[in-house]
Amino acid sequence: MSAALRTHASRVDSQVELQRNTNPRMPRNIIIDTDPGQDDAVAILLALASPGEIEVLGITAVAGNVPLPLTQKNARIVCELAGRPDVPVFAGCSAPLTRTLVTAEHVHGKTGLDGPQLSDPTMPLQEWHGVDFIIDTLRREPSGTVTLCPLGPLTNIATAFQRAPDIIARVAEIVLMGGAYFQVGNITPAAEFNIYVDPEAAEIVFRSGAPITTMPLDVTHKALTTAPHVQGFRNMGTKAGTMVAAWTDFFERFDKEKYGSDGAPLHDPCVIAYLLEPEMFSGRHVNVEIETKSNLTRGMTVADWWRVTDRTPNAMFMGHLDADRFFDLLTERIARL
Ligand code: RIB
Ligand code: CA
């Protein structure tokens, strides 16, 4: 972590807590940073189906599940599916800060949105780099009013924090999908994919001093799309419902084989559901450090769940959700599209 970032992070730590706009009555202004991915797609649909509660200022694509040319294209496909070609979509970083990109076609398919047949998007990709959009938005919007929602590797967020440390104190909250503790890893025995792909970026974000709420595998593995849920999406008879059913059907085959679970874990929609109904989640505010040195445990989120160290708590680490309430919300919102 650069000296400037370290200084800034410590200043943020010591600063009196900024009044952060997480007021439930006002729409939450968010930036979704994403690597679609079927579960990212469902998360984006959930956000766009909730106007008045969530205002999506923009979507920044990052390399992750599939390379950047596909994640930026997929983000635009999803916006058009939601009838929202007005949402600006930006391409961000095409590779981790220092490491070679690791992708997950084995889970998401070659396109990243395998399952249904999809036509190419017609809405344009924005000219700006996604990192510039993140920096500019946080500087332009009133401090404490923009929530960052990373759903993939944290490369874009970390790059923005490195290039513009002044924006860190202006972030209302970072609500991200990533990490694992009691559920251990999904890409290696020790690490969850989003953190594994860019552990250095994750370290910058978790040490930044910004308020962080984490949706790790510990909670997302409790959001399983069982067959009745998939049928519920299909029975909507809408394009969005049919797509979500096809995506969750495809996405499920990998997890069912691997975990023998009945249904696929809907990881990324947990982030958006938290913005809409935070009380359906519970967890613990603990210290989370990222393993960046060892190859064996690269990307592990070392959560001090039992507070056995004197390391300062830096993240709300979620462990439980009310799955019925989660799927009731998701079904009701997707049916709106
Ligand atoms: O480990 C699950 C996470 O990795 C999800 O965000 C999925 O979309 C992939 O990015
Ligand atoms: Ca993702």
Image (cartoon, grey):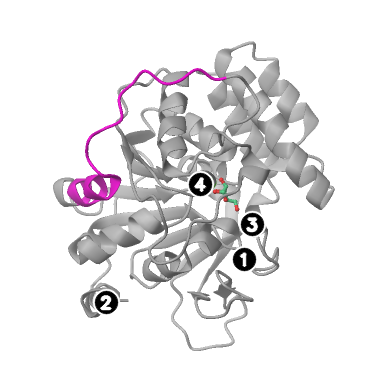
- Whole-angstrom CA distance, mark 3 to mark 1, is 10 Å
| Above or below, 267 relative to 217 | above
Q: Which mark is residue 191?
A: 1
| Above or below, 330 relative to 269 | above
Q: Say whether disc 1 or disc 4 marks the residue closer to the N-terminus.
A: 1
Q: Say whether disc 3 or disc 1 marks the residue closer to the N-terminus.
A: 1
Determine which residue is flagged by label 3: 217
Q: Which mark is residue 2?
A: 2
On the rendered image, what quadrant is the N terminus found in?
Answer: bottom left
Query: Which label lies toward us, 1 or 4?
Result: 1
Q: Residues within 10 Å of mark 4 (few under 14, many from 20)?
A: many
Residue ID at (78%, 27%): 228
- Whole-angstrom CA distance, mark 1 to mark 4, is 19 Å
x, y percent for residue 167: 21, 59
Q: Secondary structure at mark 3?
A: helix
Residue 237 included in the magenta stretch of the image: no
Would residue 133 be found to the left or right of residue 220 on screen? left
Q: Identify which amino acid the numbered label 1 is placed on.
A: Ala
Determine which residue is flagged by label 4: 271
x, y percent for residue 105: 62, 43
Residue at mark 3: C-beta within 8 A of ligand 1: yes
Query: Which label lies toward us, 3 or 4?
Result: 3
Q: Secondary structure at mark 2?
A: loop
Q: Secondary structure at mark 4?
A: helix
Would residue 134 be found to the left or right of residue 294 on screen? left
Frontmost residue, 79 versus 274: 79
Q: Say whether disc 3 or disc 4 marks the residue closer to the N-terminus.
A: 3
Q: Identify which amino acid the numbered label 3 is placed on.
A: Leu
Residue ID at (82%, 41%): 262
| Above or below, 196 relative to 11 | above
- Whole-angstrom CA distance, mark 1 to mark 2, is 25 Å
